[in-house]
Amino acid sequence: LYFRGAAMLSILHRFESLRQPRGDSNLKAQWIADFFRVIGDCPDVLGFLWFQMDKERDWRFNTTPASTQSFRDELAQWMSGGRPS
């Protein structure tokens, strides 16, 4: 996340969401929606970095159809200046 401050620019980075091996396959989609809801409430957030790797665990946002659609929808809404759903 990038925050615009009066005299500085702070960077918080490396956001990811792990797919649960067992359980609700839509949980990752909800985590993604929650992430965009949080940054949508912070008008000084200018951007973010997502850890998009299958390394030790699969951290990618596109591991399920639901998580892929959630990321696409929420990113488009956030970038347009709208509030995430």
Image: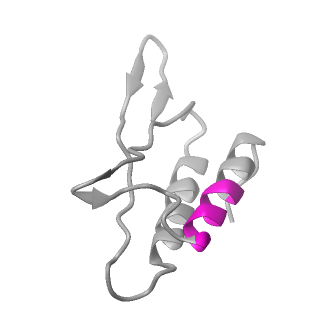
Q: Residue 8: give x, y in percent of width and height.
A: 42, 14
The answer to whether 72 is drawn above or below residue 48 in the figure is: below
Q: Main secondary structure of the magenta part?
A: helix
Return the residue nearer the eye: 76 or 18: 18
- In the image, is 9 to the left or to the right of 26? left
**For the view shown, which residue lies furthest in the bottom direction?**
23
- In the image, is 19 to the left or to the right of 32? left
Return the residue nearer the eye: 44 or 84: 84
Quadrant containing the N terminus is top left
Q: Residue 17: give x, y in percent of width and height.
A: 39, 60
What span is colored magenta in the figure?
65-73
Scheme by which the image is coloured: one colour
Residue 84 is inside the magenta segment: no
The residue at the point 78 percent across, 42 percent down is 80
Q: Residue 67: give x, y in percent of width and height.
A: 55, 67
Residue 69 is inside the magenta segment: yes
Quadrant containing the C terminus is bottom right
The answer to whether 62 is drawn above or below residue 66 in the figure is: above
The residue at the point 76 percent across, 50 percent down is 82
**For the view shown, which residue lies furthest in the left direction?**
56
The residue at the point 38 percent across, 23 percent down is 10
**For the view shown, which residue lies furthest in the top direction?**
7
The answer to whether 12 is drawn above or below residue 59 in the figure is: above
Q: Residue 44: give x, y in percent of width and height.
A: 56, 32
Return the residue nearer the eye: 22 or 70: 22
